[in-house]
Image (cartoon, rainbow, N blue to C red):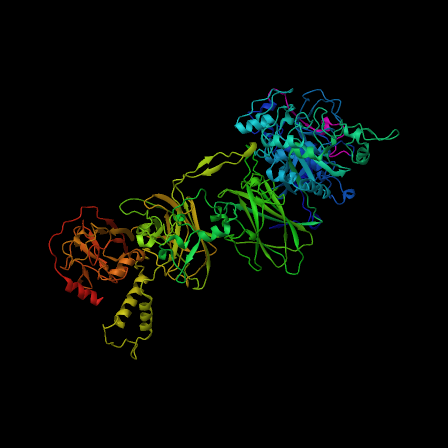
Amino acid sequence: FLSLEMAENQEWEQSEEDRIIAMLQDTRATNYCDPVFTADPSSLYRDPELAPDYDKGSGAIRWVRGMDYASNPDYLKDDASGVVVNGRMDDLWLVSAMAAVAAHPIDPNNIEDGGSLIETLFGSSPDDFKDFGVYTARIYKNGQWVEVVCDTRMPCAPPTKSVVVPGLKSSTSLVPIGCRAEDANEQWVPFLEKAFAKFHGSYESLNSGCIGEGLVDLTGGSVETIVLGSPAAKALIDGPGGRMWTMIKAYVEDKYSIVCAAMPTAEEDRREAEKMVPPAPEAPPGGPRSPSAMKRIGSTNSFQRQNSLSSMNITTPTTPMSGAAANLAFDKAAGIMPGTSGIEAGAGLSVLKALRVGKFDLVQLKNPLPSGGFSWTGSWGRRAEEWAEFPEIAEELADYGGVPVTRVNDDTTVGSIIDDGTFWMAAQEFMALFSKIHVCRVFPDNRFKQFCIHGEWDADTSGGGLRIHPDDADSSAAMQIEYHNKTRSLLDLNLCESYALRANPEVLVRPAANPSASSSWFKNPQYSITVPAGAHNVKVHISLLQHDRRTKNKLNENLALGFTVLRRKPGIVSRCWDVMKSSEVLFDSTKSPLINSGTGWAAAGHASKEVETMDHDATREICGDVVFEPGCSYLIVPHTEKQGACAKYVLRLFTPVHSELNISMIPKISTLKLESGWVRGDVESCGGPLLTVQDKPNVKPEESKDQSEGEERPHDVILAANPKWCENPQFLLRMPHGVPQAAIARVTFVVKRTDLTPKVVRGHGRKGQAQPDRLKYDDRAPGVGMLICKVSASEDPADRRRRDKAEAAERTDALGEALPTKESSLRHKPRTVYLAEAREAAAMSESGNELPVERKMAVSSKEWHMMSDLSNRVVSHISMPMFSSSFAPDGLIIVPSLSVAGTPGTFSLEVHSDTPGLRLDAMPAGRSKTIAGEWIQATAGGSHINTGTWKRNPRFHLKVLGGRTKLKITLTRPASVWKSQVNKDSLGCMIGFYVCKGPITNRDLSGNILYEDEPWSETPFVPTHSVSTPVNFELPPLEDEVYSIIPATFDADKLGPFVLSVTADSEVHLSRDTGKVEKPAVKVAGGMGAFAGRFARK
């Protein structure tokens, strides 16, 4: 943060110019020669070996000091006309801004005590440039004043045509090739131009620019640019009460510096529409002109284009304009065209007065660049008939200037025959003729306080713009749906009548067109603003200024940018992650009707879709006024329109000098990012969505009797669980080590597709209005989404409580040794077994040899989870306001998915949080495997007691790649799908699985697989929906061999999906057996009795 201090409070320091003068005095040198910006082609051109077209064939250029070509040089002359003559270069944007600033007083509210603002731009004594050939110019760049020290040598050449230059020595015929004052004795014009050229590297680097940027660089103020041809401005012009005219009058009364620019020509408009390169113009006297001189001033938007033909002395064509420009011009001022009006397109004219005189609304303007003696030829121009028709108007305006000689009565005449470039114009024609109005507001130090914040958007903090639509409240609520044991889960919803997601079950598979900016907007820099309680309301002018993108080699395009001001609850001084309601937005520059490029909504008393545009034009500055109330909290969020755009910026706040305002920067967020993908192969990870839309159920005749003919049934679509969902990549998020259990982290999860390439769709506007290009993604691409849930507890909560209670009640003798305990197997495991398992688990944890977190197989309706929809093809995000170790002791599992199973793709998972140190890990690919399967008619063989069919069951192969491996094999089935079958036959629907050596199905009881030194071949069959191997189950590696896992139901012909997962402490490989189904063979040992005994023991 930088605060602006009064100059008298600063200690004096020797300036660079002072040191140069001291050096000249010590060496008795006469004039300073700048060793950096030398008098040679390197200071004139970007490439010293390649002169631009405007200097080819124009003769030799000599570097001459003002004392050598001017008869009596000074910075400013009191009797000067104020007229500025443009030079060869295409820096009309800067020349127009200089002329406007020269006419602006230092303090508009105290004109008599101060001179022109131009005087503040020079930090030298009045005679230093004469005595020592050095001067210091001050220009405002990137939020601070920069002093540029130059010598007084100017590039000069003979005039291109025979003209009389006042103040020129009779002994010379040289004048500066750049811009100059009409009176050669006024040196401030070439001095300022050279200072800008030195700052940017060369004179050629000044070609093309925006008048508004020049005004900021010369004043340090803030410029609002109004595009008169924009739909928003047109709504104000045509709207009730003529609000645009009222605004302009208010700007003039507030003594703002106002510069307007004429429209482009029809030929330029046509070329822009056709994307054609303008043909090279005929070479004017003095040599050909540079192609860069054909560049427009400012943005290439159709409403912002300004051409620079006036700098080349080319008469603009009189062919009709096209598009919105022609419609507006002909509607407002029939036949008034640039080129025939006496005003050249691209020239910046200063607005001096805006008055209502009699029944006429009139604007007084000053043209600082008169060309060939031409001036305004329309109504109220110097040769207009209106003056003779209404002499009383001439009499009333005579004191302001710009009135031609007019006879009021037989004895009285008013006005002047001298044309100093000042003239009057009807307000109606003013609105039609000019394309843009630049309103520059200057903030004197004695009346305003400035807060200046220097910041930067980088890859981590450039989050793009905030977009709020009328249905935001609904869509935002639908994007993040939280379920817990107090509400119904989607897994419990069989019918679409629940309207769980936007009242439309197809949202689960419906893709959207474009990514949501809200998935990244929160990353932008944020600044908290408060007004102390008991203070007065503070009116603040906010200016967001990006760093100057002009370099010596080229003029880079400005980034489209904006800022949002949010109103928050009192006392909240933290980052804003979501804007759920438009009422939270106090000010949004992208939706303000006239901010800099006419973007947003028209403000003619109503919002209209006819004038709405969500695209933002690229101007260097965005500004606006807001009022902050005491006791409230506010947030300012500067942003670029495009996510990921990088640039430096300056955020400035101007307040009354006696106001109170507290500003603090919100700390940056912590970001974790992992790259992954949905792949296809032996073990697929393209699981698809958690729920899918199934076909409508068959309607029984008796169920449809009560329905009237043609009535639509509400149960046409069913939401069913997708058993392959668990195959998707899964990630684990945990709190940092050592944080308290109650510590809360705010987290936002973002999943972005990284394999989609959009197409650029060219914009087409109405009535010739150019619209920005937009990106379009493939309509066939599936939507992306994610689910977040807690890590499942490793054991039943009741068992955990019993174990903790047993540990607390352990009996010891006087030496601290455990007393013998009578073991019992009637109810649960003996206490000693629990204690042994607890000690073993603790030892494993300390040695780092614990099993990884199990993958999520399914989501129960009784457990907490958050799920986004799949409505976007590019990005999906979920915000979680409260994440803590007490809420999720073992962490959270994140499961990204696509709306169509089996679709491969790549993505990035980002986790943004206000708490650093969060741990994000992908579930180890080699240590955690999941495969979805299904018992169908051909593979539902039942348990081994069904000797003729059980080998038909699906078979999976497990390969242990490390040493002896501790693992957990789990068979799970979705409860919602199996619910009806289990209710009818709970015994026959029991599930279990077998594990055997080798790729062939068998039930080996010979001791090849041991558990606790006893042969083990299968799990018990249980009536629940999940069954696993026992605790501390281990398998040794097999040389060139695999284990086979055979899941089964107790009875045959029980059809439905299931999921098989393996979690191990070392790398394993799980695959589906793709061989043919084996024929029933030999009856295996063991029968119902053995199975029943094992089931009873379980």
Residue 401 point in image, percent of width and height: 78, 33
Quadrant (top left/top right/bottom left/bottom right) for the C terminus: bottom left
Residue bounds of the magenta highlight? 56-77
Extreme residue in the bottom direction = 814
**1092 lies above or below 261:** below
Please identify the quarter of the rendering in which residue 149 is found: top right
Residue 961 point in image, percent of width and height: 24, 51
Magenta region, main secondary structure: loop
Query: Is 399 placed left or right of 368 in the picture?
Result: right
Extreme residue in the left direction = 1082
Q: How many marks?
A: 0
Q: 429 and 52: which one is in front? A: 429
Residue 884 point in image, percent of width and height: 43, 61
Q: Is residue 465 magenta?
A: no
Residue 811 point in image, percent of width and height: 30, 77
Extreme residue in the right direction = 411
Please identify the quarter of the rendering in which residue 758 is found: top left
Q: 274 and 639: which one is in front? A: 274
**756 lies above or below 812:** above
Query: Is 506 placed left or right of 344 in the picture?
Result: left
Query: Is 576 placed left or right of 105 in the picture?
Result: left
Please identify the quarter of the rendering in which residue 91 is found: top right
- Residue 1008 can be seen, yes or no: yes
- Residue 192 can be seen, yes or no: no
Q: Is residue 58 magenta?
A: yes
